[in-house]
Amino acid sequence: MDTPFIITLDGPAGVGKSTLAKRLADHFKIAYLDTGAMFRGTAWQLGEGSWDWDEDKLDEALKGLEFSLSGSGSNSILSLNNSPLTDEIRTETVGMWASNVAKIPAVREYQKIAQRSIGETTSLIAEGRDMGTVIFPQAPCKFFLDADLEERAQRRFMQLQEMGKPADMEELVEQIRARDDQDRNRKAAPLKPAEDSILVDTTNLDIDGVFEKLVFETEKKIN
Ligand code: DC
């Protein structure tokens, strides 16, 4: 079997990673791995306050979680214990829970094993915070997206509205700021660009422009 081809896409909340990752996955006909959804699913399943559990209780609970990925492109389906993850995990509250559990080294270790095992058999566009730095450092194609906080909050606002989830803009700015601070400043696998990643500031770019750039850069690596 050919070695799977991995594209990594990292960056802070609301930068447009999911939209771009799905489009890239469709374009290159590979699967899409949303690792944020894995942390959200973990936090959702374990519940509020699980980030304060003692090591044994947490280890036991983590052993009961099994993630799998099926399908391809934007139709890739991420399941937890054989049930596809749903929009229930998409609120900003669950995002913060996810960021809270994501600080814990045991949780990250568990996720690393699950994510690498998916990448061993499947060509992927892998989206998250530490895809290029920690999980797939050997990936031939790495991107790091960034954008101003206000712009990211606005994008997340639109996304939540489309899902029928009401949101307050000012509250969203504060929630995203707090989550990013926590993700950038944690000890374990903090959010940062890999040294060999291509940095794209998307603040003043539309999604089509960013998509074209990512396709162009990826094709350079393939050919
Ligand atoms: O991408 P997202 O907003 O769905 O991610 C939710 C949280 O999960 C994010 O604030 C931090 C954590 N996360 C992480 O620590 N590492 C990843 N690779 C992906 C997400």
Image (tube, rainbow, N blue to C red):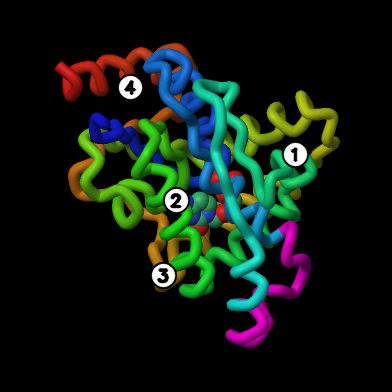
Q: What amino acid type should be assigned to the residue bearing mark 1?
A: Thr
Residue on which the image places disc 3: 188
Residue on which the image places disc 4: 214
**Mark 3 and 4 residues: CB-CB less than 8 Å, in contact?**
no
Is 186 within the magenta?
no
Residue on which the image places disc 1: 86
Q: Relative to 221, say whether 49 is above or below.
A: below
Q: What amino acid type should be assigned to the residue bearing mark 2?
A: Gln
Q: Residue 107: where, in percent of width, then height?
A: 53, 68
Q: Residue 180: where, in percent of width, then height?
A: 53, 55
* 51 horizontally vs 133: left or right: right
Task: Please name whichever residue, 39 or 30, is drawn nearer the observer in this view of the structure.
Answer: 30
Residue at 39% from the left image edge and 63% from the top image edge: 189
**Mark 1 and 2 residues: CB-CB less than 8 Å, in contact?**
no
Which of the two marks, 1 or 3, is nearer to us in this view?
1
Q: What amino acid type should be assigned to the residue bearing mark 3?
A: Ala
Between the residue at mark 1 and the residue at mark 2, the CA separation in whole angstroms equals: 19 Å
Residue on which the image places disc 2: 115
Residue at 49% from the left image edge and 38% from the top image edge: 33
Q: Residue 46: where, in percent of width, then height?
A: 73, 66
Counting residues from the start of the chain, the first of labels 2 and 4 encountered is 2
**Mark 2 and 4 residues: CB-CB less than 8 Å, in contact?**
no
* 182 horizontally vs 93: left or right: left
Between the residue at mark 3 and the residue at mark 4, the CA separation in whole angstroms equals: 28 Å
* Residue density around tag 4, few if under 14, some if 14–19, many if 20 or more, within 10 Å: many
Q: Which residues are magenta?
A: 44-58
Q: Is residue 145 visible?
A: no
Confirm or reject: label 2 Cβ below 8 Å from ligand 1. Answer: yes
Task: Please name whichever residue, 101 or 154, is drawn nearer the observer in this view of the structure.
Answer: 101
* Residue density around tag 3, few if under 14, some if 14–19, many if 20 or more, within 10 Å: some
Farthest residue to the front: give it. 1
